Amino acid sequence: MSFATLWESLLPIGRDGLSGGYRRFSWTPEDAACRAWFTRSAAERDLRVLTDSNGNLWAWWDPPGLAPGPGVPGGSKAVVTGSHLDSVPDGGAFDGPLGVVSAFAAVDLLRERGCLPVRPLGIAAFSEEEGARFGVACLGSRLLAGAIDPDAARALADAAGVTLAEAMAAAGHDPDGIGPDDGLLAAIGAYVELHVEQGRALADLGAAVAIGEQIWPHGRWRLDFTGRPDHAGTATLADRRDPMLPFAAAVLAARQAAAAHGARATVGKVTAEPGAVNAVSARVSAWLDARGPDERTLQAVVGEVLAAAREAAAGHGVELAAAPESVTPAVIFDPGLRERLASSLEAQGIRAPLLPTGAGHDAGVLAARVPTAMLFVRNPTGVSHSPAEHAEPADCAAGVRALATVLEDLACS
Ligand code: GLV
Ligand code: MN
Ligand code: MN
């Protein structure tokens, strides 16, 4: 099956008719449709599908003659590729799905080339990578790697107050079993995630694919400003305790701190309660996403934003509660694996520069437990987390070739 056929079979799922963006949130009917697509695509390739205790999907190509699955005594460590199928609200088609579709297409290409794996080759689709529903980025891989407490994860709630435990149960997945799976991780020798680039570096370098070098440390902080609801026409300015004002100060401080430190800070989500045009708000909740080239810079940016928010809140008689929702330290991908990718690509005449990224990935979480690498595919405008996200078909094909080359080296020899 061609890449285009596989790609187009996934495209309609969760696409919003108005924006053209994707709304694929974990444990929803759209998520179930993505899971069914994954299972179908694996079955079409005679791959064995498993859902792990955390709701991540796995499709295994078992080497002939070896007992099935990783972790089997005598079996050698598995090579895994993949990404995620969930999206941010109105996300693009490529962020996540490109890695999963390319993984299936790479299996097709390996078979065309007559390659047989000598160790288990797995394709993974991690659950809730974007944290769009429950707030914690890379939730599925974090649970697998033991990077989040299972009780805390079960209690995470979406905007409607539905907990992760309730959402999983409603979708037919037992939430009691979530948590670290050391046996599965110990059985994986390498994880290689292919992902659309979320910046313009490859377009500027004139290359179709890159090897990931590192991920900036990054995180999300929730800020709740609580004031006093009041009448927009009659409450004097002096009498108000308006939470919108320190919120606005925090947004401006975020921009200023990011610019001063060569970092990124974004407030992309905000809610105002009760949300009346003609009333001072009772509460404003905002989410700060901050990222920096190193831990010290990130801490400096977040520290400055929180200090400015506290000062403005105090000045307006507003209470402020601020807490991190998920924080991911800096990741330097495994140098040995990176070198191995570089030499296998070079041997095939594939030019792949090294790129750092400010975007988060399941590969970044797994890197704490498993040798991990990434491949990026050129995005001509660099726009991502937007319906305008794009990669040209020729570059997607180059990505599949690069991934197949790497997998052939790692799993078939
Ligand atoms: C995921 O794409 C992130 O970087 O937030
Ligand atoms: Mn993303
Ligand atoms: Mn992604």
Image (cartoon, helix red, strand yellow):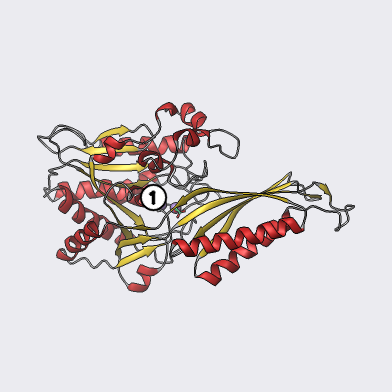
Q: Which residue is mark 1?
A: 96
The image position of residue 107, as x and y in percent, is 21, 46
Percent x, y of residue 227: 76, 48
Q: Nearer the viewer, residue 8 or 349?
A: 349
In this view of the protein, which residue sits in the foreground, 12 or 188?
Answer: 188
Asked if residue 387 is positioned above or below residue 353 in the image, the reply reads above
Instruction: Give above or below for 340 relative to 279.
Output: below
Residue appearing at x 31%, y 42% in the figure: 124
Q: Is residue 252 left or right of residue 24?
A: right
For residue 398, side relative to residue 288 (left or right) = left
Q: Residue at x 34, y 37 (%)?
A: 57
Give how far across and how far down residue 221 sits, in percent: 56, 51
Disc 1 residue: CB within 8 Å of ligand 3: yes
In the rendered image of this protein, does residue 165 appear above or below residue 369?
Answer: above
**Residue 19, can we see it?**
no
Q: Residues within 10 Å of mark 1 (few under 14, many from 20)?
A: many
Under mark 1, the amino acid is: Gly
Q: Could one spot residue 316 in this view of the protein? A: yes
Q: Disc 1 on helix, strand or loop?
A: loop
Q: 116 or 71, which lies in front? A: 71
Q: Nearer the viewer, residue 130 or 250?
A: 250
